[in-house]
Image (cartoon, grey):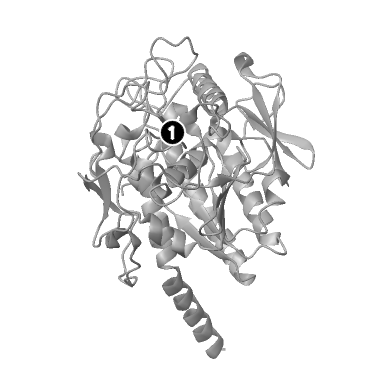
């Protein structure tokens, strides 16, 4: 993957620019308000939809595939082949998709692209081919066997929820979960796969730290107060029991924000407040990630594996979000046709740096950190976003082309291919780490 530094992550008229005037940057932040606030919050996960189409059962309705097929239910031995599964290319997969929008109730309305008239379907028919090895297609029975008696939590924003819904749809070939949530709040749901005693949960945390939306802001679009040294107790106090914790974040930091430390304003990101220093979005993001990781490492009873899912780039072309910018491509890029740059690159590098620091600290307490590095794979998928196919054309809604989230079925399903392979290799990696630790001790 080629990495290039640039200043602006959006494209105008097909070309990037290294400089932008402040008003245009403000427009970018307005986009985040509409797309990451209105869109994600408008349609929750249909937990309590009255339509019979969304009635919940622990059994899937007429599976697309025969789950008795040995290719699905068998548990082959895990290869110990050394390979970077996150570096590769997309190749055709005529067998996909492995569920449809009519067989899975867990699809968020705004990612239900086929329901709302997307005319092409080839975007669903690709698989990820790592350089030098093969990445198996997600096997739902294998996954459920590996997590039998365990629990997994997703912590973060609507892209993380997008991932969880994809996982539920993939698992629907074997079993649907039942709702065991502690609260009616759709942003804090829990699902139980009864046959496997497996719990899946989601914790909504846009910035991973304590945050509060203010009543003011540039152009009245809203402004977030971010408390960079205070925890978001809605998830931090709830994760002790989980075996796997998948965290993500980044897109919400594009929004205007005021940064607090020790209960005092220390700066902001495009807040346009008098006498407040602009520290940029990267300052806030780094501090927030660092606080979240420190919170995890400080927990007394948490013994789970923490998985950071890396940043998934946006794909606006030919203008900003409100200038006709869109994502209308119908096939993936090759790795030599694009490169990670601008804000996406900066956020990604911050993630890697803070992750490595947290990993080192976590090891001292016997905690495991793993990186689910989806960045290159998703950089190459400009064809996988909902664009305008998240609602009917005649609907009177204030929505813009969505080039942030992912259609279901779609490229995001591959994240579970990655996740399962990581889990299958966990025993090998843990043994290698123990061996390295023993060697260090013997040399002392």
**Residue drawn at (48%, 80%) of the image:** 436
Q: Secondary structure at mark 1?
A: loop
Q: Please say whether residue 153 is visible from this viewpoint.
A: no
Q: Report whether residue 206 is seen.
A: yes
In this picture, residue 249 sits left or right of residue 67: right
- Above or below — where is 422 with respect to 211? below
Residue at x 66%, y 29% (from the top left corner): 224
Nearer to the camera, 180 or 266: 180
x then y, percent, for residue 269? 61, 30
Label 1 Cα neighbours within 10 Å, binned few <14 / some 14-19 / many ≥20 = many
Outermost residue toward the right in this view = 263
- Left or right of 395 on screen, residue 40: right
The image quarter containing residue 359 is bottom right
Residue 141 horizontal/vertical position (percent): 39, 58
Residue at image mark 1: 405
| Residue 305 x, y percent position in the rendering | 55, 62
Question: Foreground residue, 34 or 65?
Answer: 65
In this rendering, the count of numbered labels is: 1
Rendering quarter of residue 341: top left
Residue 209 vs residue 403: left or right? right
In-image side of 148 versus 324 (left or right): right
Residue 148 pos. (x, y %): 51, 63
Q: Nearer the viewer, residue 29 or 25?
A: 29
């Amino acid at each position: 993957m080629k990495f290039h530094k640039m200043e602006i992550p959006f494209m105008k008229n097909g070309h990037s620019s290294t400089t932008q005037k402040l008003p245009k940057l403000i427009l970018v932040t307005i986009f985040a308000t509409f797309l990451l606030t209105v869109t994600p919050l408008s349609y929750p996960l249909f937990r309590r939809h009255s339509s019979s189409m969304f009635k919940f059962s622990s059994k899937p309705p007429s599976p697309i595939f025969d789950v008795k097929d040995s290719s699905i239910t068998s548990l082959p031995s895990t290869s110990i082949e050394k390979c970077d599964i996150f570096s590769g290319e997309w190749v055709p997969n005529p067998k996909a998709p492995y569920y449809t929008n009519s067989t899975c109730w867990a699809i968020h309305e705004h990612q239900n692209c086929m329901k709302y008239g997307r005319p092409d379907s080839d975007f669903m028919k690709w698989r990820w081919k790592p350089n030098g090895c093969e990445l198996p297609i997600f096997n739902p029975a294998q996954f459920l066997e590996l997590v039998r008696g365990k629990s997994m939590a997703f912590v973060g924003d609507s892209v993380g929820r997008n991932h969880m819904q994809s996982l539920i749809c993939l698992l629907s070939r074997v079993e649907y979960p039942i709702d065991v949530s502690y609260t009616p709040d759709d942003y804090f749901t829990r699902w139980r796969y009864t046959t496997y005693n497996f719990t899946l949960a989601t914790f909504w945390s846009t910035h991973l730290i304590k945050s509060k939306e203010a009543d003011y802001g540039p152009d009245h679009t809203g402004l977030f107060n971010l408390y960079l040294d205070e925890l978001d107790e809605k998830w931090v106090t709830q994760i002790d029991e989980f075996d796997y914790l998948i965290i993500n974040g980044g897109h919400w930091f594009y929004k205007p924000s005021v940064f607090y430390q020790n209960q005092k304003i220390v700066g902001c990101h495009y807040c346009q407040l008098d006498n407040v220093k602009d520290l940029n979005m990267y300052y806030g993001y780094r501090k927030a990630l660092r606080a979240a990781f420190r919170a995890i490492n400080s927990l007394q009873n948490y013994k789970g594996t923490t998985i950071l899912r890396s940043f998934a780039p946006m794909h606006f072309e030919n203008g900003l979000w409100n200038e006709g910018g869109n994502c209308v491509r119908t096939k993936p890029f090759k790795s030599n046709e694009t490169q990670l740059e601008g804000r996406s690159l900066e956020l990604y590098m911050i993630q890697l740096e803070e992750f490595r620091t947290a990993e080192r600290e976590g090891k001292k307490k016997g905690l495991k950190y793993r990186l689910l590095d989806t960045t290159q794979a998703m950089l190459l998928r400009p064809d996988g976003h909902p664009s305008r196919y998240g609602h009917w054309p005649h609907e009177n809604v204030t929505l813009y082309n969505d080039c942030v989230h992912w259609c279901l079925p779609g490229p995001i399903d591959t994240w579970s291919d990655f996740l399962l392979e990581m889990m299958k290799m966990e025993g090998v990696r843990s043994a290698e780490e123990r061996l390295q630790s023993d060697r260090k001790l013997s040399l002392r």
